[in-house]
Amino acid sequence: MIKVGIHKVKGNSMLPTIENGSYVFSFFLNPLKMSPKYIYKIIHPSLGLIIKRFKYIDDSGHLWFEGDCQESTSSLNIGKINRDQVLGRIFFVISRYKIIIL
């Protein structure tokens, strides 16, 4: 089954790719392919729902993510993420000035 979601972005951590106030569309398939070129929707225990770019999988199988902007929360502060915390991959962005297909 495919799950699809729409969310409004708050913050600048994914600039220049995704602007504050943009709407992102996500999908979830099981299993979800993880690739560093893609952006994902994650449920984080202390940060809540976040949108970040996948960075790598460590030797323990944990996933690591980062923002596109230098001022974004660092991947070390985000910490390791379990696969079940990944809620979907962002595939479409609508902002004030552009539409992006990812």
Image (spheres, helix red, strand yellow):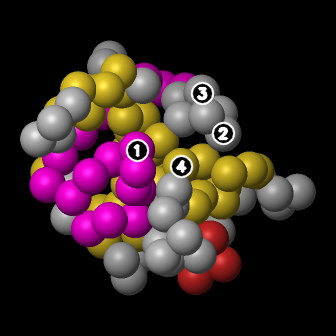
* Distance from Cα at disc 1 to Cα at disc 2: 14 Å
Q: Nearer the viewer, mark 1 or mark 2?
A: 1
In the displayed image of the protein, which residue is found farthest to the top?
1
* Distance from Cα at disc 3 to Cα at disc 2: 10 Å
> In terms of sequence position, does the residue under pointer 1 or pointer 2 come before the other?
1
Q: Is mark 4 on a helix, strand or loop?
A: strand
* Distance from Cα at disc 4 to Cα at disc 2: 7 Å
Q: Name the residue under label 3.
A: 33
* Distance from Cα at disc 4 to Cα at disc 3: 13 Å
Q: Give the range drawn in magenta.
A: 11-31
Q: Position of residue 16 (x, y in %)?
A: 41, 50
State yes or no: residue 9 in magenta: no
Q: In this view, does 79 lie to the left or right of 92?
A: right
Q: Are marks 4 and 1 in contact (CB under 8 Å)?
A: yes
Q: Name the residue under label 4.
A: 53
In this view of the protein, can residue 57 be seen by the observer? yes
* Distance from Cα at disc 3 to Cα at disc 1: 21 Å
Q: Which of marks 4 and 3 is in front?
A: 4
Q: Where is residue 48 in the image (x, y as percent from the top left)?
A: 30, 71
Q: Where is residue 55 in the image (x, y as percent from the top left)?
A: 68, 51
Q: For residue 17, which numbered disc appears in the image?
A: 1
Q: Residues within 10 Å of mark 2 (few under 14, many from 20)?
A: some
> In terms of sequence position, does the residue under pointer 3 or pointer 1 come before the other?
1
